Amino acid sequence: MAAYDNGRSGHPVLLARDHWAAVAALAVGDIGARPYLRVHADAVRGAALCRRG
């Protein structure tokens, strides 16, 4: 699950434990889970951010 704001994904991202090893294998430097999420875009569920104020 990834947070979305104005159609753009961002933080936080919630990853199920069964994805951790594959994400860690692709995560290099400051890239994080981005490559894994792109490859598995069809499995990503979004949640709209709520803004206060």
Image: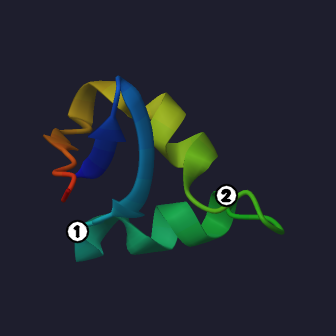
Identified at 67% across, 57% down, the residue is 26
Please name whichever residue, 14 or 43, is drawn nearer the observer in this view of the structure. Answer: 14
Relative vertical location of residue 44 with respect to residue 30 in this rendering, above or below: above
- Say if 43 sits above or below 25 in the image: above
**Type of amino acid under label 1:** Ala
Residue 14 vs residue 22: left or right?
left
Q: Report which quarter residue 17 is drawn in.
A: bottom left
User: To which residue does mark 1 refer?
Assistant: 16
Q: Position of residue 37 (x, y in %)?
A: 46, 42
43 shown above or below 17: above
Q: Which percent across, then down, holds residue 46? A: 20, 39
Report how many numbered discs are placed on residues in the image.
Answer: 2
Disc 2 marks a residue whose amino acid type is: Leu
Residue at (29, 49) in percent of width and height = 3
**Furthest residue in direction front, as rendered:** 53
Q: Residue at x 37, y 64 (%)?
A: 12
Tag 2 or tag 1, which sits nearer the N-term? 1
Left or right: residue 16 compared with residue 37: left
The secondary structure type at the circle numbered 1 is: loop
Q: Which corner quadrant holds the C terminus?
A: bottom left
Q: Position of residue 7 (x, y in %)?
A: 35, 23
What residue did someone put label 2 on?
26
Residue lying furthest right in this view? 29
User: Residue 18 at x, y = what percent?
Assistant: 26, 69
Give the residue at x 22% y 68%. 16
| 2 sits to left or right of 8 | left
